[in-house]
Amino acid sequence: MASLKYEIPLLDRNTRFALWQIKIQAVLAQMDLEDALLGIDKMPSTLTDEEKKRKDRKALTQLHLHLSNEILQDVMKEKTAAALWKRLEQICMSKTLTSKLHMKQRLYAHRLEEGASVHEHLTVFKEILSNLEAMEVQYDKEDLGLILLCSLPPSYSTFRDTILYSRESLTVDEVYDSLTSYDKMKHLVVKPDSQGEGLIVRGRQDRNIDDDRGRTQERNHRGKSKGRSKSSNRGKTCNFCKKKGHIKSECYKLQNKIKREAANQKGKQPENSGEADAVEDYSDGELLVASVNDSKVSEEWILDSGCTFHMSPNRDWFTTYETVSEGVVLMGNNASCKIAGVGTIKVKMFDGVVRTLSDVRYVPELKRNLISLSTLDSKGYRYTAESGVLKISKGSLVVMKGQRKTAKLYILQGSTVTGDAAVASSSLSDDDITKLWHMRLGHMSENGMVELSKRGLLDGQGICKLNFCEHYVFGKQKRVRFTRGIHNTKETLEYIHSDLWGPSRVPSRGGANYMLTFIDDFSRKVWAFFLK
């Protein structure tokens, strides 16, 4: 035991006091002196007064030897180990409200920067927690776990959602383990030489599986001949894609861009470039998201439950537009597309009504127009799918319809209104205008609409002949006037009114669900009877 050496740093104002305390307590425990920190009066009664004083002097000496000069000069007047220990806590770990506020601010403001080390982030987080525990500040473990999740950057949103929605409760230790494992897996993932801009195309046919294996083997074969050294470039940043771990000459995004430009000049696509075209006919498979590397921009709108907001690559479709300088769209393989602007687009729906999509992101690199179902849901719309038709409604009004195509995507039934057509009313035919006014006015009859048109209440629009309207036939109002009843009664019980009300959704205390009333027309006396 005498040959053991303890390399404990001297305590100064930059030392983590909570950890230093644990180390010093361990040293004193090895020397059987830990009782001295409690005070001479609290030492075991089996010791004599001389033994207690000897123990206290040894413990005091050990504490003095592990203090820096700036700390020692503040505590040199303390004569016992317990008094010195208490004084050190006051200097290095004050429990005042100001110290607690400062430490809590550090806890809530602690953030993990993009690309920074997760290990260092957790180390600082644990240091703050240990200081708070030394100040006797208690936190619920679930609250600490949520605070740690909130400190993660936007690139960890998928990890955060997985943690939150996969369990009903969590602790900070579970977040520690999950975050550490997730960080290790991120460093183990081998990036391919080229990456498509779509999510995943997954099929069940053997033919597709064999093709995927062939492409994988070919990519692996290429990777052996020109593998990049991750150890030498780990701390470097690419000047093209701004990501860490490689340099510009090894950037796969730059290589893919050069290949695409060369292929466009030759009039053909490069072979084995890793780009997946949008699948339009895919039997017995699942297409999660259409690829953006298609050479032709589609004019269809896809109703997508996976995107976070409406997106379009067509700049000339926007009726209002505002340029933005920041913002990206993340794909399923962590590839990013820059958002160039935000605006509104007008779309003529299946019923002829022109509706406006607001907050549409202009993403030039996309090849598909996407309508976000989650955005519509947040605005109070409801969507249901049945028999290949997706209906989006608000209340009882169906505002959009989507038809399922062969690629198992729901395509919007409608067309985009571009340019001046969004303002000019003459772009609609007279039949469409008549149908539009007919639905706006609650399926009013043709004669009623003609009368309103004569009075100039339909913006000067003429009315054409209406087609057969099933809703109008089954829901039209009855035009026969109700006759007014006249009863001249001269005595009681000559004429009686009766009414049966019910059933009620909530029965009465006696179990009745109906109420029968009788009213005498002459005296207006009312009898009420409750029925089951």
Image (tube, helix red, strand yellow):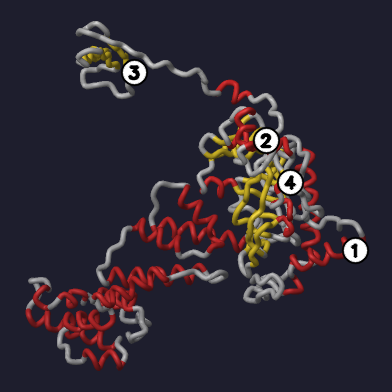
- Crowding at label 2, few (<14), some or many (≥20) Cα neighbours within 10 Å? many
Marks 3 and 2, the one that precedes in the sequence: 2
Disc 4 to disc 1, how far (Cα)?
Answer: 43 Å
Q: Residue 265 carries which label?
A: 1
Question: Mark 3, mark 1: which one is toward the viewer?
Answer: 3
Mark 2 element type: helix
Residue 477 % position (x, y): 52, 23
Q: Residue 434 carries which label?
A: 2
Q: Is residue 172 visible?
A: yes
Disc 2 to disc 4, how far (Cα)?
Answer: 13 Å
Using the image as rendered, state which of residue 260 and residue 182 is in the foreground: 260
Mark 3 element type: loop
Given contact means CB atoms under 8 Å apart, are the residues at marks 2 and 4 in contact?
no
Mark 4 lies on residue: 426
Residue 290 horizontal side relative to residue 515, left or right: right
Mark 4 element type: helix
Marks 3 and 1, the one that precedes in the sequence: 1
Residue 408 % position (x, y): 70, 38
Please name the amino acid that badge 2 sits on: Thr
Mark 3 lies on residue: 503
Question: Mark 3, mark 2: which one is toward the viewer?
Answer: 2
Please name the amino acid that badge 4 sits on: Ser
Which quarter of the rendering shows the N terminus?
Answer: bottom left
Using the image as rendered, state which of residue 38 and residue 325 is in the foreground: 325
Residue 23 % position (x, y): 32, 76
Marks 1 and 2, the one that precedes in the sequence: 1
Please name the amino acid that badge 1 sits on: Gln
